[in-house]
Amino acid sequence: MDRNGLLAGKKGVIFGALNESSIAWAIAEAAHREGAEFALSNAPVARRLGSLDQLAERTGSPVLWADATRDEDLSGLFDQLKAQYGQIDFIVHAIAMGVNVRKRRAYEKLNYSWYAKTLDVSAISLHRIVHHAMEAKALRTGGSVLTISYIGAQRSFSKYSEMGDAKALLESIVRTWGARLGAHGIRINAISQSPTRTTAGQGISGFDAMFEFGDRLAPLGNASAASCGDYAVTLLSDLTRMVTMQTLYHDGGFSHMGISDEFIEPLMRSLKDPSP
């Protein structure tokens, strides 16, 4: 896309970029294109798992390593941000990990320690980040907080398992914080993104089927990470200054579809001829 300067003069922090397939990576590239300055953050373990330093070099951004499930890490991170930028204009939270999902543990037989870790990393981390930002008075009036969700928060997808619970909690945190952040002139929203070929997404058993189903059912097909980055820019910009507490579907229309002709026709053929 062309540069439009939608975020010129704005400063922020983007959590969760790991490699070029990450949605946070695409958001960072779009925000950089639109003139924003920002820090990048991920857990220290990402030093050996990803390529965040490449993104930092490409966008001219500092990397602030912090575990978003640790209060002391986040407190220190916002102190560093204030020293670097003063108050910031936006926070992007794109952090998720389904431990039971990755270990192929069925929803009916969850390991509850892993389940708690999933909720902490994928949802409660957003609460912690906003809490520490507000404690540090790091977010400017008119600021924007953005997180990434999936329609599994609203509907049951068998292979999505515990992550559906995590995304439902994430969206609830958006609404509950939003009712409080408004008093400070700060907004918070979630983008409910199509299945996207990220490192986290491809750790889900059956992901390819979820991706194909979404792509066939959505009138516009699945939305890419790059197009999510472009959409995110609008939600960090002043163009959406009165939008808050929303889960906004960026999924090619999937969320409003029932069934399409592409699914009906083979289904009807199989019903007429049930033989293998």
Image: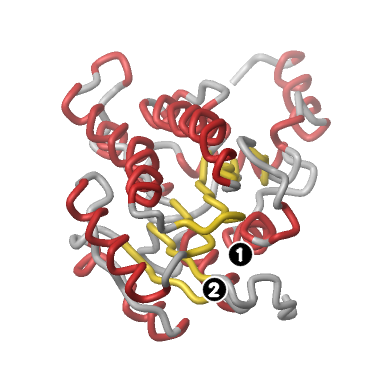
x, y percent for residue 268: 78, 19
Secondary element at tag 2: helix
Secondary element at tag 1: helix
Question: Which image quarter: residue 253?
Answer: top right
Q: Are marks 2 and 1 in contact (CB under 8 Å)?
A: yes
Q: Earlier in the sequence, mark 2 or mark 1?
A: 2
Q: Which residue is mark 1?
A: 226
Q: Residue at x 24, y 54 (%)?
A: 75
Q: Quadrant of the N terminus?
A: bottom right
Q: Residue at x 22, y 60 (%)?
A: 76
Q: Is residue 209 visible?
A: no
Of residue 139 and residue 8, the one placed in the foreground of this image is: 139
Q: Residue at x 20, y 55 (%)?
A: 73
Of residue 170 and residue 118, the one placed in the foreground of this image is: 170
Q: From what the image shows, is residue 261 above or below residue 192?
A: above
x, y percent for residue 117: 23, 34
Identified by mark 2, the residue type is Glu
At label 1, counting other C-alpha atoms closer than 10 Å, the crowd grade (few under 14, some 14-19, many 20 or more) is some
Identified by mark 1, the residue type is Ala
In the displayed structure image, the side of residue 38 where residue 250 appears, left or right: right
Of residue 268 and residue 234, the one placed in the foreground of this image is: 234
Q: Which residue is mark 2?
A: 29
Residue 75: mark: none
Q: Is residue 14 visible?
A: yes
Q: Residue at x 57, y 47 (%)?
A: 186
In the displayed structure image, the side of residue 189 where residue 270 appears, left or right: right
